Image (cartoon, rainbow, N blue to C red):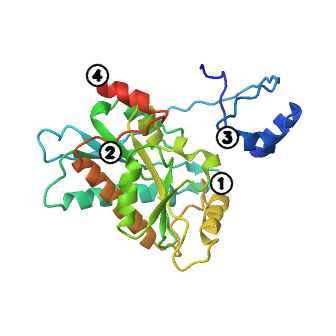
Amino acid sequence: MGKVSVESWMAVDAARKLLQMAGQDFDKLKQQAATREFKPVPLGLTASMTLQTKLHTIDSQNVMGKIEGSDPAQKDEYVVYTAHWDHFGKKPEGIFHGAQDDALGAAALIEVARAFGKLPSPPRRSILFLAVTAEEQGLLGSEFYAVTPVYPLAKTVADINMDSWNVSGRTKDLTLVGLGASDLDDYVRDAAAEQGRVVHGDAEPQKGFYYRSDHFNFAKQGVPALSPEGGVDYIGQPADFGQKVRDEWTANRYHKPADVVLPTWDMSGAREDLKVYFAVGYRVAEADRFPEWKPGNEFKAKRDAMLKK
């Protein structure tokens, strides 16, 4: 099936109005869309639009570090950790510091690299630490690497992306955006279970987060890619605390100058999350086989074709 000419996200209120113009009911169609029997519904509407853009050319860089694997037969295979070091810079409304999104990720790259460096010996496969640029401008840095990789993607075992952080304390759970996509989920479940924690899917699947951060560019090229987030079931907090944390972040600090380091941050949960990410990367680097996409996943065919070459 070919793609439509124009693709975009649409706000819920706008979608309701559009479907109403076509004589359709949003809630009814949404309910139907949750079933396997659902098929696209022609709306019979046409639209015209004008897009005005300004182009700015900037030179920026991805920053990369590597710990070479210990196995001569597997050191040319790579587990990649990614985080983006950019944000929106300075605008009329202020400086966009990007502390939580994603300076914490850049710091996490350094700490994971430090942890790998302290091992008695490196894992069998090599570990690549990739701080990518221009994520906020459309995932440009990770896209550049994914289409012009320094190391072959057929030898790239997995990407573990770190672009969402819990700064509010320990949780009983861990969120995986795109849960069910690949064998990497099983690695996360095992590592989280060792901390007495459980894994669940995205708390807000309607926002399409799996397609909105740097791991997506690896996935598009067929590389199994992990997109973890902090949990929502906070230890010692009321049941609705996690949702309140998410709502406050989205309303007041996400992509705003207010994304700064706060004295209220409690990094104990982020520390536990990072231990999980380290364990996953280490175990994938030591495993006898590559992780695979689950049957039916949209990225599986590309990976299978890549590995057959």
| Residue pointed to by mark 1 | 93
Q: Which mark is residue 236?
A: none
Using the numbered discs, state the Cα–Cα distance from disc 2 to disc 4 in whole angstroms.
Answer: 22 Å
State the count of labels: 4
Give the residue at x 36% y 24%: 305
Q: How busy is the neighbourhood of tag 1: few (under 14 within 10 Å), some, or many (20 plus)?
A: few
Q: How busy is the neighbourhood of tag 4: few (under 14 within 10 Å), some, or many (20 plus)?
A: few
**Image location (x, y in percent) of residue 195:** 37, 69
Q: Amino acid at mark 1?
A: Glu
Give the residue at x 50% y 60%: 100
Using the numbered discs, state the Cα–Cα distance from disc 3 to disc 4 in whole angstroms.
Answer: 37 Å
| Residue pointed to by mark 2 | 80
Q: The C terminus lies in which quarter of the figure?
A: top left
Q: Secondary structure at mark 3?
A: loop
Using the numbered discs, state the Cα–Cα distance from disc 1 to disc 3 in whole angstroms.
Answer: 44 Å
| Residue pointed to by mark 3 | 35
